[in-house]
Image: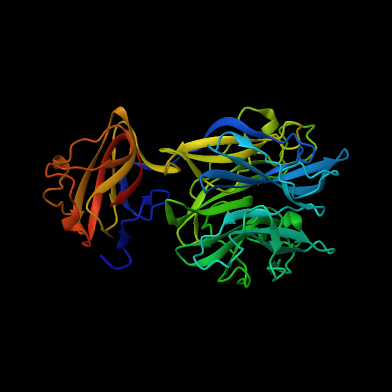
Amino acid sequence: MTAKDLRQIGSRLELFVDDWLIDRMSDTTLKMHPPVPREVVLEFNRVWEGPISLPGSVIHDGGRYRMWYAARSSSGASGQSSGSHTAYAESADGIHWERPELGIAEVDGSTANNVVAYDTDDTHIGGIYRDRNPDVRPGETYKAVTVRRRADRSHYIRGFTSNDGLNWHIVDRDPLLVAPRDDWPIFDGEAAVFWDTVQEEYVGYFRGWEPARGGTYSDLRGGVRSIRRSTSPDFREWSELQFIDMGDSTQEHLYKHTCEPYFRAPHIYLMFPWRFVPGRRFDPDWPDHGISETVFMSSRDGIHFDRRFMEAFVRPGPDPLNWGDRSNMMSSGVVQTGPAELSVYYSEHYRSPTCRMRWATLRIDGFVSVNAPYAGGELTTRPLTFEGGELVINYATSVAGSIRVEVQEADGKAIDGHLLPQNAEIFGDEIERVVAWDSGTDVSALAGRPVRLRFTMKDADLYSIRFR
């Protein structure tokens, strides 16, 4: 065993969104779990909204859920935007949303609306989040960015700050970033910017155009929409942009790249890019080409992303109005709405009079699981060290299924007192199940010592583990 092989997890939560903790799998697989669609929670039917409105950001803040979105009105037969508002809604439960009359921005001669900002340049304040930097500047509790376009069509990033999430001010350093002068100097598509509590820096993700593999490009058709990253110590000075690394996965057009540290395990980034397939039309009479959906990937350093799941995270489904361009786009923000429930939000019916936002749910930590079929399978972790006295697992089985856990030395030798036969079968569906052996649940004598965990599973899913 080398230092590179050892995983030091302490008492933090570890998700099986990738194979970082996994050494060997036998007849088990990593399985992605798309969210379950629920009710429509917001219909874009106000005068200042319209059929080309788009999702923005959702956070849980001060005992309430807060949502910002792009309320985009349109005019003319082309359906092009005639301006973009940043609008606000809030909810006590994450399901029932209200538009408060804020009296901040005047739209069509009235301030009786939920608009917090208005821009006639087809932009809106996006990527809104609450800053977790312990040294955040006074009056800058909330931060956001917007993409602006110059006369030559090149793009730049403008920063915004707010004390309450409603009244916004342009950052003194303007612009924050300018799109590189490559063949397609654009940032269009909402950016994601946040304070990373683990790496202690601001991190931003922005759209860029990447050459197709095996060749170069000189215009729009030759490149692939992709994702660039930049960091900052102070939200003012930003590093040179670099494309994220998605390994050797198939190149696809990805943008509207919502990204965030998972709030229960902030050392893991979750990204939900919007996959766009140009040239396709489900409805031959649709006014624009291309169809879209949301996909999923994760990272542990913010640069290298695990793109193993090429399947959709949010599909269009059977509704034909979701098979036009730019539907099925997720808001940024995964929020907890119940003891065992996470919620996400995504758009439907883009370019339709019924343009709207839908709510969807998944279990806590339930993005990906180690899945075993009825015939059974095994998982053995890499050598790890932990802190704490109990092993807790988030799992689900069928009534005929089960999970058993064995603790081994780093060399694979089973440790007496924590042998597989000494662990009673675990079955059920629990977010936090304390693992017990004949001797009890206490594993504190093994804390700080390199060990492995061996799981034998039958018709079961294992989502996450934690020592506590």
Q: Give me the residue at 75% from left, 48% from top.
A: 85
Q: Give me the residue at 50% from left, 36% from top.
A: 361
Residue 162 is situated, as x and y percent measured from the top left of the image, at 64, 59
Colour scheme shown: rainbow
Q: Give me the residue at 12% from left, 41% from top.
A: 438
Of 230 and 159, the residue lying toward us: 159
Q: Give me the residue at 62% from left, 68% from top.
A: 241
Would you say 159 lies left or right of 463 here? right
Counting labels gives: 0
Please identify the quarter of the rendering in which residue 357 is found.
Answer: top right
Of 447 and 174, the residue lying toward us: 174
Tell me if residue 460 can be seen: no
* The N terminus, quarter of image: bottom left
Would you say 22 lies left or right of 305 here? left
Please identify the quarter of the rendering in which residue 219 is found.
Answer: bottom right
Residue 285 is situated, as x and y percent measured from the top left of the image, at 80, 32
Tell me if residue 455 can be seen: yes
Would you say 131 lies left or right of 427 here? right
Q: Is 327 situated above or below 321?
A: below
Of 311 and 364, the residue lying toward us: 364
Residue 414 is situated, as x and y percent measured from the top left of the image, at 15, 51
Residue 153 is situated, as x and y percent measured from the top left of the image, at 81, 61
Residue at far right of view: 76
